[in-house]
Structure formats: structure tokens, C-alpha cells
Image: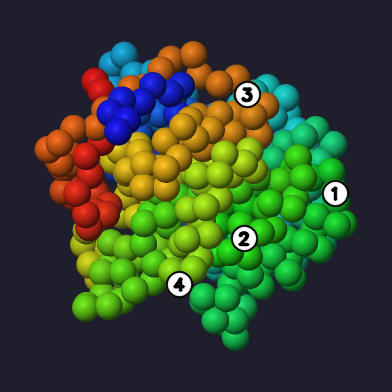
Amino acid sequence: MIQHLDIPRPDDWHLHLRDGAMLQGILPETARDFARAIIMPNLVPPVVTAEQAAAYRDRILAALPEGADFQPLMTLYLTEDTDPADVAAAAASGLVKAVKLYPAGATTNSHSGVRNFDRVMPVLEKMAEIGLPLCTHGEVTTAEVDIFDREAVFIDTILDPLRRRLPGLRVVMEHITTEEGVAYAAEGGDNLGATITTHHLIINRNHILVGGIKPHYYCLPVAKREKHRLALRRAATSGNPRYFLGTDSAPHIDALKEHACGCAGCFTATNTMPLLAHIFEEEGALDRLSAFASENGPAFYRLPVNQARMQLVRQDAPTTFPEKIETGAGPVTVFNPGFPIHWSVKR
Ligand code: DOR
Ligand code: ZN
């Protein structure tokens, strides 16, 4: 049995860091294990301009613990007023690595998102020209579409038409949750990638709803049926360069998760790498963890693989993780897989 793994230091290609006291409290959880992360721009108000992204990056860097080896990769929040020249300048300076598309109303703080795609075509055309990826929250928001179907309907009615209209646009399907998402990404060619979260490899919708509602398992896109979770596991552990890790670790304080209208988001920054080692071991794919967590993402983003290394070790005693991270904004519950994990990151 493999007891030890040595991989390039991983990156997180989809992360929510928030701001202020929450940022300060949760940033060390990511910076401990990850060299880089694509930082989601859904603050209140959202990060829309290059100037706002530069200021947010500075706040992140200021919140880093002493000696941390972590680089935030900034994104801009696409609105119908986004200026193509501002995006191009932010990309040329190296500040911004992607633009995020939230269909209006899809999730936390997405009301400034896109309603009419014709209005963002000039930005998307500029992005295609310069090779800047569009990260998509792939769910339609139409009231009549069932929440469990929203990803598949997004692929058919928005993503595929958009990619046909603009084949040069580089797209990341963020946090795919369905076999339809897995299949579409597999066929997409070099201009298409897909991130997969840790929690969608572990939970299906029963985990959220059977035996009492579990607010800490509620996120968007919501976890689907078991067959979809299995498709995600096959994709993540396949080594296929289209798929890479984006945790979508999304902290909310407990008071807002355990609430009559609970917020969406699972907080996995603290224990993602041990959880992934467990999953890849179960799938007989430990030799492909490096592709998923450390190599495929940089290849898509045209960045070097990290020089630093991470060691993961398997031990007989279960690893203990904190139940909560205490932040100045309040406690944040760490994702609990519901089974013992025997892997840990060697410090
Ligand atoms: O579960 C989620 N939480 N999904 C998202 O798309 C947004 C995120 C958040 O910002 O809390
Ligand atoms: Zn997200």
C-alpha cells in the first residue's frame, strides 16, 4: 500500500476568499497548502474593474501570514458594462488571469451578472483575441428550470451556443456537477477546461437531505444524484488534462449557514488535499493526483507547474481536522466528509 506521496505544490483554480475579518481568518487555510489560487470576484460590491482587482489583491497579500508561499491570481466579474480595454490592460499587466461569468441571480452576490449576452460580446471577443479565459458559473437562472437541471440546460442553451459563436474563446466550466458537464468538457478541445470541487467528489444530494437537512453540505451548483458524483470521480481521477481542481471553498459564518435561508458554500480549504488523497486512493489513482491538483490547471492557464513540492503521508490513525475555523467575522465550519481520513500533509 502506498504510504507516501510527493507532488508539486498544488493550486486551487476556484476559490472564495471574501474580505476583511473573514479574509484574515480563512486565508491561512489556503496559503498553507496551495501555491496559487484563482480568486473569485463576487465580493459586495463585486470586483469589476482592474483598479478594484489590484486593490483586492493588495488586501489579500496584506492578510497573508508571515513567510507564506501563496500567490492570488485575480479575476474580474463580468457585467454588461465591463470595458474590453480595461480587461485587456489588466490581462496585459499580468494582474488578471480570467474573467468570471455569473448568469444574473445564479448564486451568492450574482445580481450584477449577465442577463443579455449580446451586451458582453465585445469583451468576450477581446478575451478570445488575447487568450484570456472565461470562467463560467454554469447554471441557468430561469425560474421554471428545476435546480437539479440547471447545469445541463446551461450547457445546451448558453455555453454551447456561445462557444460556437466564438470558438476562439477559452472557457473553464467551473465546479461541474453532472455527467453532462463531464461529457461536454471531454469533447471540448484545448480551449475548454473544467474544475471539479472536493466536495462534489464526496457528497450526492442524499447527503444534504436524508435524515435531516445538512446546511454545511449545501452549495451551488447543488450536489446531484449518485451517478453524477461517480462521473465526476472518474473524470477527476482520469488524468485527462481537461479536468483540474477548483475547490470552490466558500466560507460563510455558521449563523448564516444554519439559518432559515442558509447560504450556499462548502468550506474545504483546510482539508482538501488529505480528502483528495483519500478519494484518489479509493479509485486506485494516487499516481494521478498530481495531474488533477498540480499539473492540469497550470497547463490550461499557461503557467509553470510549481517548483515547490508537497508530501502527503498515510498513517493508521485518522487525521484530525479542526471542526471550525474561528474568524473575526464568526466561526466557519470545515467540510466534514463523514468518514475517517488517514492522509495528512507533511509539515
Ligand atoms: O456554493 C457556492 N458558494 N457557490 C457559488 O457559486 C458561490 C459561493 C459563494 O460565494 O458563497
Ligand atoms: Zn464559486
Q: Which residue is mark 3?
A: 303
Distance from the alpha carbon under mark 1 to that under mark 2: 18 Å
Query: Residue 188: percent from the left, percent from the top?
Result: 75, 50
Badge 1 density bin: few <14, some 14–19, many ≥20, Cα 10 Å: some
Image depth: mark 2 or mark 3 in front? 2
Secondary structure beneath dot 4 equals loop
Q: Which residue is mark 4?
A: 225
Secondary structure beneath dot 2 equals helix
Contact check, label 4 and label 1, Cβ < 8 Å: no
Name which residue type carries label 1: Pro
Distance from the alpha carbon under mark 3 to that under mark 1: 22 Å
Identified at 69% across, 58% down, the residue is 184
Q: Is residue 224 left or right of residue 90?
A: left
Which is more N-terminal, label 1 or label 3? Answer: 1
Q: Which residue is mark 1?
A: 167
Rendering quarter of residue 102: bottom right
Name which residue type carries label 3: Leu
Name which residue type carries label 4: Arg
Name which residue type carries label 2: Gly
Q: Nearer the viewer, residue 149 or 76?
A: 149
The dot on residue 148 is: none
Q: Residue furthest bottom?
A: 144
Which is more N-terminal, label 4 or label 3? Answer: 4
Q: Please name the colour scheme applied to the rendered image.
A: rainbow
The dot on residue 181 is: 2
Secondary structure beneath dot 1 equals loop
Some atom of ligand 1 lies within 8 Å of the CB belonging to the residue at label 2:
no
